[in-house]
Amino acid sequence: MTRKPTDIRQEEIKAAVLRIIFRDGLKKLSTKNIATEVGISEGSIFRHFKTKKDIILGIMDDVIENLIEKLRDISLENTPPKERMFKYLCETVNYLRKNKGITILLFTEASYENDDELMTKLNYIFNNQKQLAGKIINDGIAMQLWDENISVNDVTELYMGIPITLNIEMVLNQDGFEAQNFCKRMFDLIMKLLKK
Amino acid sequence: MTRKPTDIRQEEIKAAVLRIIFRDGLKKLSTKNIATEVGISEGSIFRHFKTKKDIILGIMDDVIENLIEKLRDISLENTPPKERMFKYLCETVNYLRKNKGITILLFTEASYENDDELMTKLNYIFNNQKQLAGKIINDGIAMQLWDENISVNDVTELYMGIPITLNIEMVLNQDGFEAQNFCKRMFDLIMKLLKK
DNA sequence: TTCTTAAGTAAGTATTTGCTTACAAATTTA
DNA sequence: TAAATTTGTAAGCAAATACTTACTTAAGAA
């Protein structure tokens, strides 16, 4: 019976959640299984999180803090748009590959529960990702590097499919997915879309 | 107590499943709720489907029969690739808009259950959609209409994000989603990607 | 018309769900 | 060192889950 402070246990619990989701599917995401995965009793889970939903919300907050805020920094950087776009895309892809359960959690749990609070947070994450990418594109157009006739909204809408495509490929093709240059390949496509 | 033959009830049950998923979320998809939605008792559900999973598999078979086979026809048509591509994309978008629960069911239920049989069928649907789109693109390249330097696989991978993007927009933006010309807009982007 | 079959039901089943309670023991604070 | 607080547990909660059972009744075939 080793005891650890709440903040540490909270991190362990959130990590366990993502592991279970990617490895066993959302159906196995019970408080009982989370506890077993962490190596504590089920009751202990509720020492560190008020409800199961709070764990999910906590993970979403991590995404906002660790991914969205990083993307915001990249988007606002004072570097050439092309360079920024590449960093932006790779940052997203790498984050999702490092945190493999995230995509399923975001797009599945929210529509699974159909809960307002979860939906609002998903909306925030989704819209920010889209708008911050849109800013880079608008900068490039303003600097006359890219096609001013293109609809920025359409491009960002298409862009938003990339993380999900990545995830489907990772799940369906678990072993041999060639993700090494995934972001470079997608980047080249986006560049062609933006070319004058 | 009006009685109906199995084949009719099966259709009613599958339609009810899609309605529940889109309206209330996957969590509400219990056999109890399905029965209430259809207007029969829970036990009756099991007269018409052996298990709940069989209902889901049945819906996936409908997708294969009604969407994938239609897409196959379009892909193999003897019309100009550009025309075929437009029809192909619009057929997909319209099908998913008409059957609103489908996307969530496909991408959520499969990863929710993490079940082999469901995964295999999802894989089939996903790969066919991708490969049939790829055939159109390859035809266009062979006819020297489109850029032969582009990676067909990359384009189809990006293409596969479109249905999911559509769905996220529909779910998050339930009321005022401007889907009228969604497929035209996405088509224009794909055309720019393929242009020499 | 009779008789078989298929479609219906209410009331169960065992299991799982998220969460609580009552109490024990480790750690921090006074 | 003593007291207060925090982290842990086992056992139990009501509600929900997918599915079964035993029995009824409507509809089509003989």
Image: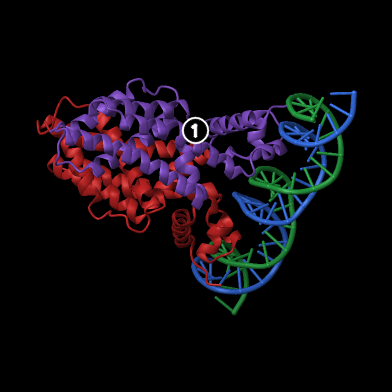
Chain colours: A red, B purple, C blue, D green
Q: Which residue is mark 1?
A: B101
Q: Quadrant of residue B12?
A: top right
Q: Amino acid at mark 1?
A: Gly
Q: Name the residue located 40 percent from the left edge and 49 percent from the top edge.
A: A102
- The reply to whether residue B50 is in sight is yes
Residue B86 placement, left or right of B43 = left
Q: Chain of mark 1?
A: B
B163 or B68, nearer to the observer: B68
Label 1, residues with CA under 10 Å away: few <14, some 14-19, many ≥20 = many
Q: Quadrant of residue B167?
A: top left
Q: Position of residue A105 (x, y in %)?
A: 44, 47
Quadrant, the N terminus of chain A: bottom right
Q: Can you say whether A49 is above or below D30 in the image?
A: below
Q: Name the residue located 27 percent from the left edge and 37 percent from the top edge.
A: B135
Residue A61 placement, left or right of A162 = right
* Mark 1 residue element: loop
Q: Name the residue located 64 percent from the left edge and 30 percent from the top edge.
A: B9
- The reply to whether residue A54 is in sight is no
B136 or B12, nearer to the observer: B136
